[in-house]
Amino acid sequence: MSTPIRATLTVLGLALVALPGGASGPDASPAKQSEIDSQYVQAPTPARMGIIDGATNPDDIPDELAYRLVFLAMAEPENPKPEERARASAKMLKAGLDEADRDRLLIRLGKLWTMMASIKTERERIIARDPQPDPSSADARRIEQLANQEKAVMAKTLSDLPSYLTSDGLARFSAFVREAKCHMKVIQGDRMSKTATESVHCSQ
C-alpha cells in the first residue's frame, strides 16, 4: 500500500514544493509554475514514520520520489510555447545537460506531462462527483487504479532515461537528482483520505 507523504525541495534556484491539497493543475498560469497533481507518492514504508531530512540523510530519500519531483519540476506541455521551452531549458541547464539532451528530455517529459494531466483530470471528475467515495465503490477502485497507473507512468519515464539521454547526460542528470535529495524533506504521517492530492509547484 502506498504511503502518503509531503515533500519539499529547493535546489540550485529551482523551487519545488509537494503538498497535500491546494490549487493545482496543468491549466494553471504557466508563467509562474508547472504543476501536476498526484494522489499518492509511492514510497517504501519506513520502520518509523516521521521526517526524513535529506540534508542529513539523503540516502533515505527514495530514488523514485527524488526523480518524480525533479521530473515534474522540469516538465512542460507537449509542443511547448517558446516561453515554456525556455523555462524548461533553463531548469535543465542546472543539471548540466547539453542542448541535445535538453531537447530530448523536453520531449519525453512533455509526454509525461500529458499522461499525468489526463490522470489528474479523470481523478478530479470522480472526486467532484463524490468527494469521499466508499472504499468498496467503483469510484474508489478507479481512484486506486489511477494511482497505480500514475506510478507505472513515472516508473516508465525513469527506466527509459538511458534511451533518450546520452551517457554523459544521464550521469549529469543522476548527479543532479542526488544533489537534489540534499534539499528535500519528506514528511510521512497517518493515511490520508483518498481524496487528498499532492501538488508539485515549480517556479523559475
Image: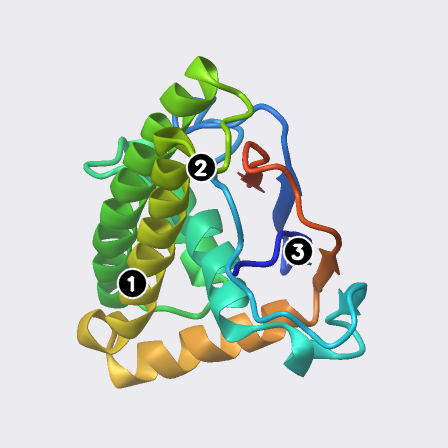
Say what amino acid the circle numbered 3 marks.
Leu
Residue 136 numbered mark, or none: 2
Say what amino acid the circle numbered 1 marks.
Thr
Mark closer to the chain start, 1 or 3: 3
Which quadrant does the C terminus fall into?
top right
User: How far across and down, in percent of the image, does residue 159 sit?
Assistant: 29, 73
Say what amino acid the circle numbered 2 marks.
Ser
Mark closer to the chain start, 1 or 2: 2
Dot 3: few (<14), some (14–19), or many (≥20) neighbours within 10 Å? many
Q: Judging from the image, what secondary structure is the residue with disc 3 in?
A: strand
User: How far across and down, in percent of the image, does residue 113 sit?
Assistant: 32, 42
Question: What residue is shown at x 56% (from left), y 37% (from top)?
Answer: 197
Q: Judging from the image, what secondary structure is the residue with disc 1 in?
A: helix
Label 1 to label 2: alpha-carbon separation: 31 Å
Pointer 3 residue: 9
Question: What residue is shown at x 52% (from left), y 27% (from top)?
Answer: 24
- Name the quadrant containing residue 184: bottom right
Colour pattern: rainbow
Pointer 1 residue: 157
Question: What residue is shown at x 50% (from left), y 60% (from top)?
Answer: 42
Q: Which of marks 1 and 3 is in front?
A: 1
Question: What residue is shown at x 46% (from left), y 59% (from top)?
Answer: 68
